[in-house]
Amino acid sequence: MTGILTNFRSTIIVSFVLALVMVFGFGHSPNGFHGAYWQAVFRWLHVLFGILWIGLLYYFNFVQMRVMPTIPAELKPAVSKYIAPEALFWFRWSALATWIMGMIVAFSRGYLMEAITLGAWQGYQRGVDMGFTFIGMGMWLATVMFFNVWGLIWPNQKRALGLAPADDATKAKAATTAMLFSRINLLLSIPMLVTMTMYQTLFN
């Protein structure tokens, strides 16, 4: 057991094997391996990748960016050359996976167009389509966050960390830009999570 737990890859493999056993077990529910079952599988993946994405967003904002100014100059390369690039790898790909799985869930449950149009697709009916308005707002917030990751945060972080060619002035500007859009994502994340979690309780 110690051999598994001291190796990251082994731990993740065992965890996924156990998870897939449970996923398979749910296939023996009344819905079987069709319909709502596959919606549940995609929702699980959406939540899994979402936890990784938002967890890393919170790590960057609650820990790394706040603590970096206090780290001695000789120790900062350990973060910028090793920790940050690794964290950004998982950060950007989990953002992509979260967004894709979220779109699949919305499509498979038949409310994608209603959510995208904030309920206007079927017309406003008080007490019925408000759910689409709220989940749609959450989806739009998450979409803005996703585009911020790939279109602004990651390209600027590459320059700031020296992963892409840039002079010192460009690196400094890129670091500031990446920080500001990371903070925008932090700002949007909490209301986005309100819409996602409360929708599942009140309108599903």
Image: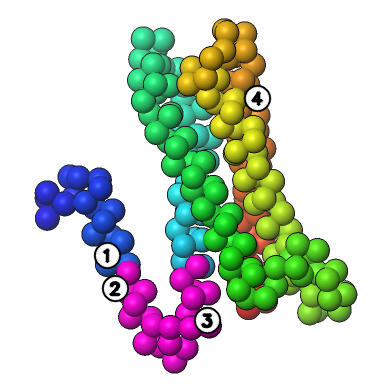
Residue 26 magenta-highlighted: yes
Q: Earlier in the sequence, mark 2 or mark 4?
A: 2
Is label 2 in a helix, a strand or a loop?
helix
**Given contact means CB atoms under 8 Å apart, are the residues at marks 4 and 1 in contact?**
no
Q: Quadrant of the C terminus?
A: bottom right
Q: In the rendered image, which residue does mark 4 sit on?
A: 177
For the residue marked with disc 4, what is the amino acid? Thr
Q: In the rendered image, which residue does mark 1 sit on?
A: 17
Q: Earlier in the sequence, mark 2 or mark 3?
A: 2
Q: In the rendered image, which residue does mark 2 sit on?
A: 21
For the residue marked with disc 2, what is the amino acid? Val
- Asked if residue 23 can be seen in this view, the reply is yes
Q: Which residues are magenta?
A: 20-42
Count neighbours of disc 3 (C-alpha within 10 A) and say few if under 14, some if 14 to 19, many if 20 or more: some
- In this orientation, which residue lies closer to the viewer: 147 or 74? 147
Q: Residue at x 64, y 68 (%)?
A: 106
Is label 3 in a helix, a strand or a loop?
helix
Q: Residue at x 57, y 8 (%)?
A: 167
Instruction: Estimate the x, y position of residue 202 in percent, counting from the top left.
Output: 66, 75
Residue located farthest toward the left when viewing the structure as drawn: 2
Q: Residue at x 64, y 35 (%)?
A: 151
- In this orientation, which residue lies closer to the viewer: 143 or 63? 143
- Determine which quarter of the picture holds residue 121: bottom right
